[in-house]
Image (tube, helix red, strand yellow):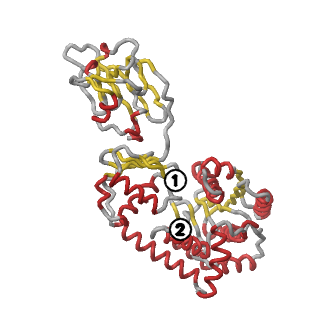
Amino acid sequence: MEKLIDFITKENFFTAGSVVGVGVSGGSDSMALLHFLNSNKDRLDIDVVAINVIHGTREADEAEAIFVEDYAREHHIRFYKFRVEAALLAKQKGMGMEEACREARYGVFESLRKRGIVDYICLAHHQRDQAETILMHILRGSGIKGASGMDFVRDGFYVRPLLDTPKDEVMQYVYENDIPYLEDETNQDTTISRNLIRNVVMPELRKVWTNLDRTLCNFGKTCKEDDAVIRSMINFDAVLYNENLIKIPLTYFVYSNSYIFRLLDDCLNRLGVTQNIERKHFLKIVDLAKTGENGAKINLPEDVDVFKEYEYITIVRKKPKFEANTEWAFKIGTIQFGDYGKLSVKRVKDHSLKVGYLLIDMDKVPKGAVWRVRKDGDYIEKFGGGIRKLKSYLNDKKVPARIRNYLPVLALNNEILAVAGVDISEQLRVTDDTKHCGLIKYDMQNWV
């Protein structure tokens, strides 16, 4: 695999002096990658560490971890071992064991990145793995992106140097360098879809198409190039992004599905959703946008909720937490409203209204008024006059149903004096006779 050094250097997979973590299971592929990078660390100007994740799903997990640890110690390679409970994760999230193991494993890798322990994670996927992945994605009904297969580098962190290297070359390197490795007995379990592809389907296909792996990988490269061209034509300017949600104007949904699906894929990726979303889920979103009623909601995998909210489709992943029965007395200062945001009240000397704030007459706030969330029977006297039920009032203000139960309202019994971030009632209006003014601000930008 001598030419691999030139390829890694040419593609600038690693920056000089970086710490490269290698995910090592003990199998032939990961042991070959660990040996190769460690043997060439001076030429590549990197430091190499071995990372083993015990998934807790097999009796052999512990023995494999010890095997990798012994090898690392013998070759003076720094070693990290982690234990995860994949079975528990699978039960909690209702996912398959293979998927749970992957999610748990990548969770470990992400924690290493956040803690600054490694600069990259190297994975030992090779050409045959790539071919299997492409075929699996096609069989699952994936679009052109899925048919593109895996990337050599993803998120500037995950690196697959062997992705274009044939399996035979990897095994030849193992034998030539006398690299020890272990066989995973579960690799023969054809009830697992990937093993069925690897052990049954692909061998039969190779009898007819001897260059099957290379052919599928070249097809994947063509798909990747075509996908990149189409994506370059998409205008994302009107899409609103923030940390926890994304808002897509309904006007985008007049375009073809080819355009919309790529837009949705980009949006989900920005929310950290890169798995388990298929064409059928995109079709559900499109149907919601075109025929759903305002306020309608659909649930997707990976804890994704999608809402139709007036002129937007809103995609939310992270779920905020909030104690709905909590009340706070009205006072000067700041209140943390669960995971949604901060509510602040401060005194001001003049009557000037600032952008993003509500201006109130502090002397008109009745004793006993509290901050809480809305309840049945709440009503408000609108600014300028007119009594409305709070629900109707929020409809008039086009407040998304998704956040109505988490908006702080200033209330005296069922009378609403102010809705934080929206408006105040007529009772708190500032006039020329007002002596003490106050400003109310509710910062929940990550949820609107």
Q: Is residue 81 above or below residue 217?
A: above
**Tag 1: Cα neighbours inside 10 Å, few (<14), some, or many (≥20)?**
some
Asked if residue 39 shows in the view, the reply is no
Q: Position of residue 431 (x, y in %)?
A: 21, 17
Marking on residue 421: none
Asked if residue 155 shows in the view, the reply is yes
- The residue where tag 1 is placed is 301
Quadrant of the image containing the C terminus: top left
| Residue in the foreground of this view, choosing between 136 and 62 | 136
Q: Is residue 392 above or below residue 415?
A: below
Q: Is residue 144 above or below residue 441?
A: below
For the residues labelled 1 and 2, the Cα–Cα distance comes to 16 Å
Residue at (79% x, 62% y) in the render: 67
Residue most toward the left?
432
Element at label 1: loop
Q: Position of residue 61 (x, y in %)?
A: 76, 58
**Tag 2: Cα neighbours inside 10 Å, few (<14), some, or many (≥20)?**
few
| Residue in the foreground of this view, choosing between 27 and 379 | 379
- The residue where tag 2 is placed is 140
255 left or right of 109 in image:
left
The amino acid type found where label 2 is placed reads: Arg
Residue at (68% x, 75% y) in the render: 199
Quadrant of the image containing the N terminus: bottom right
